[in-house]
Structures are given as structure tokens and as C-alpha cells.
Image (cartoon, rainbow, N blue to C red):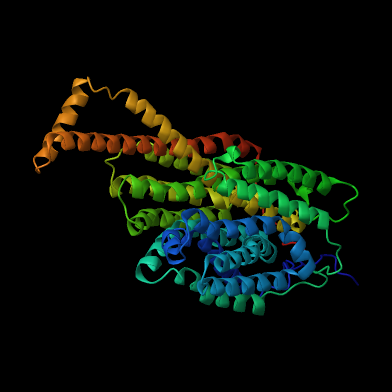
Amino acid sequence: MANATALPQPEPALDINHKFRWFILIGLMMAAVMEVLDTTIINVALPTLAGNLSATTTEVAWISTGYILSNVIVLPMTAYLTNVFGRRNYLAGSIILFIIASFLCGISHNLIELVIWRIMQGVGGAALLSTAQATIRQIFPQKQQPLVQTIFLLGIIVAPTLGPTLGGWITENYTWNWCFFINVPIGIASFFLVANYLKDPPNARDPNRKADWLGIGLLAVGLGSLQYVLEEGNQSDWFQDDTILRLAVLSGITLTVLIWWQFSSKNKQPVIDFRVLKNRDLAASILLFVAMGFGLYGGVFIFPLFSQSILGFNPTTTGLALLPGGLGTAVASMICGRLLQQGKIDPRAIIFVGVILFTFSMWELAHLSVSAGFDDVRTPLLVRGFALGFLFAPINSVAFGNIDPRQAQQASGLINLARQLGGSFGIAFLGTFVTVRTKFHRETLVEHLVITNPVVQNRVDSITHGIMAHGTGEVAARKASLGVINGVVQKQAAMLSYNDSWMLILGAFVVAIPAIFLLRRPKPAAAAPVDAH
């Protein structure tokens, strides 16, 4: 006879990895740290690389450009590649590819070799963010997602800030080769954990899936051309250069055709499932990640230029100035993860706090003067770090909180692509913006430097007499004094342009605020679903 009262059923395991998911998390987090760290650690070493490889500044920039080019092309394809090869095989293979490419970068003897292996690094690095994040979403229960996603995101958030510090220290105390060799032990440990503990559920792979070759081709040409324009546009005077203009047009056309083809009824298995963007939480989150990529990578790009050219910092001091902010991000992220796990605070409220803190930090940086020092930049950078910690985790929580787990891989690829492209837009636009605004402020300042002005005349006379006191003739001293005045004007103009740049980043965040109102509170944790595959 059947029991009148049904016995409670145990919560189903999320997938077959439930026993080892914390080992898998450690391995995936190490892979993510390795990938993101590699995007910034080498930037500090670029001048040294240029000298050692007998390359110009423009040529050596391809060490970074090549990596990002291949990375942004593969990122949107990670869902397709995971489906074909299986997540374990794809992740483990990507880690191996990254390790081998890192070692070959470290033993490269010329620029061409180094750029080729950096491109291979970028191919392997795409899965270390996108597929790794989606895997964590699939192997942990819903109630643990805020905490584990926060732990994983620590590497993505903190590594870009710590990269210049570590890169500067390695370059000054060892050689640039170790900026690549450092990936080898980290990668081996990550590969061991992923290859040994991560398993695919039955029928997870679809090796017979037909490739969307047209979509893959359009994606590679469109994103590759766009990334090249963003990376090289500032150095080539943008659309005054025929190559930049042609590639910009090509990118616009191919990306437009790509979107049409992915939605076309004739395309039965699109390489990118843009239909996932029908989820308004994901779409709004992607807009916010573009803004955060702009602020995070754009800020990391211009701060070393600002601190070393205006404040007189060396690379090590610049890294030390950024270090407290990175630690602040780590602390804020853990606090945020704990709050999200408890579920008592609406993630949207935390996002607003993060936006307020970030705008405050940008406002403070935008009001520095040429006499500023280490103590003046430390506080706003620390606040900026805390702000980023209060932004990444809750936005991720909202983005994935109301989405079908089967769409997690595609969503993760688009989110990481948005962050990367936002950073590329930030670096490209801010590089041009600083140049243009410096010229503008210089012209404005020069208009007020009339030699008949008593204040200007007294300043010139004071400098001239100081130079003459060292035995220089009056004519030469007066000429030298004008050179000093010119240097002061140029430095002040550059200072004002950096002030404008911080305000521009602030504006990007303000413009993105309406997207927060499109977000919905994540659904409460329920019984864990079956694996997304």
C-alpha cells in the first residue's frame, strides 16, 4: 500500500561534478587570473621589449594588439566550441595551448615570433574566462552562485590592477621573459585540477554539429577589423589613414551582415545565438559591462601615463599606487559576495553604491594638479578599487540570475566580449582624447601668455636671472627661460587633459545608469537544476 504522505526528495545534484566542484573552482580561477594578468603584466615591459628586440614603439605594440585581436574573435565562439569538443576537453586544451604559447613567447628571439605566439595565447585565453565562468554557473547550486562567482571574479577584477605592479617588479629585477614564464607553473596547476576533476555529463558533446562557416568568417573579419581600428587608430590619425578607414567600413558591413545571418531562418545552427539578448537583464548587464570595461581598462591605461609624465613616478611607484585599489577590490568583492549569498539586499542597490563610489573617485582624480603626489592619488584609487568590487559581482548575479542555465555559456561569451570591447574602446578613445585635449588646452593657455603682461614678464625675468646666476649670458638665459615657460605650459596642458579624461570616464558611467533600472532582482534560489548540457 502506498504511503499517504510522500517522502521528501533530496535536492538533485547539479551535475556529476558535485563532489569536486571546489577543486574545479580553484583550477578555473587560476586559469582566469593567468589570462587576465597576461593582458596587463606585459604593458610595463613594452619599452624594454622594444629595446631588446630592436623594434619601434608602434611595432612592439603588436605584442598586446595581437593577443587582444585573437581573443575577441574567439570569445563569442566559445559556446559553439564547447558544444563541439565538450567543456572539459575545450578548457583543458585551451589551458595547454596557453601554457605552450607562454613558454614560446618567453624564448622568442624576434618580434615576429613573439607576436605569433601572443596570437596563440589569445586563442587559448578566451575559454579561460568565458567557458570557465559558464562552467561555474553550471556545477554549483543556485544558492552558492553569489559566493563562487565573486571568488572567480576576483581574478578578473584584481589582475588588471596588479598586473602593472608585478610586471614592473619582474622587469626591473629579472628580464621581460619572466612575464611569460610565470604562466607556466600556474597553468600546469590549473590544468591538473581541471583535467582530473571536471567531467562532462552524458551527451554533452555534439561533435557532428555543422559548422557555421559563414558566421565564423564574418565574425573573424568584423571583430578583427574593429579591434585593429581601435588599437591602431590613434597612432594612424584615425580616418585620415586609408587603411583605418577601409577596415572601419569593412567592420561595419561584416558585423551588420553577421547579425542578419545569425537571425536568419536559413541558419539552423548559428555560431552566436543572439536570441539570448531577448533577456533584458542580460542585455542591460552587457551595457553596464561595456561601461565598466571602458573605466577599468581605460583607467589602467591612462594612469601610468599620467603618473609617470606628470607626477614623475617610476614604474614601480606607479604599480604601488595602484596596488591598494586592487586589494580594495578584493575586499569589497568578498563583502559583496557575502551580502548577495544572504539574499537580504537587492543587488541593484549594491550596484548603485558602486556607481556612486566610482563617480566620486573619478571626480577626485579629475581635480588633481601638477603638484599632486603619491598621497593625493592613493585615496581616489582606493575608492575606485572598492567601487569595482561593488559592481562586478552584483551585475553578474543579476545577469545570470534570471537566465536559462542552458544559455549560460552563450551569455558568458557575450559578457566577456562586452568587457573586452569596452576596454578596447576606452584605451583607443582615451588615447586620442588626451592628445586632442592637450593641444586644445595648450592653445588656450598660450593665448594668455602675453609678454607685455606684468605677471608673465616678472616670471620670465625671475627665471632668466636664476639661469644667469650660473654664468650663462643674458641672451642665452632669456632664451632658456622661454623654454622653461614652454615646458610648464605643456605640462599644465597635459594635466588638464588628464583631468578631462577622468571626467569622461565618469560620464560613461553616468550614461550607463539607466541600464540599472532595466535589471530585475534575481529569482530566489531553488532546487538545483540539471546540468546545462
Instruction: Name the image quarter holding residue 241.
Output: top right
Q: Position of residue 82 (x, y in %)?
A: 74, 65
Q: Is residue 163 left or right of residue 519?
A: left
Seen in the picture, residue 327 relative to 450 is either above or below; the reply is below
Quadrant of image for the C terminus: bottom right
Seen in the picture, residue 505 relative to 66 is either above or below; the reply is above
Q: Position of residue 240 (x, y in %)?
A: 58, 37
The one of 318 and 27 positioned closer to us in this rendering: 318
Residue sitting at x 75%, y 54%:
404
Q: Position of residue 199 (x, y in %)?
A: 72, 75
The one of 124 and 28 positioned closer to us in this rendering: 124
| Residue 324 shows in the view | yes
| Residue 520 shows in the view | no
The one of 90 and 335 positioned closer to us in this rendering: 90
Residue sitting at x 34%, y 23%:
447
Q: Is residue 242 left or right of residue 201?
A: left
Seen in the picture, residue 502 relative to 304 is either above or below; the reply is above
The one of 3 and 521 positioned closer to us in this rendering: 521
Quadrant of image for the N terminus: bottom right
Q: How many marks?
A: 0
Seen in the picture, residue 236 relative to 493 is either above or below; the reply is below
Q: Position of residue 106 (x, y in %)?
A: 51, 72
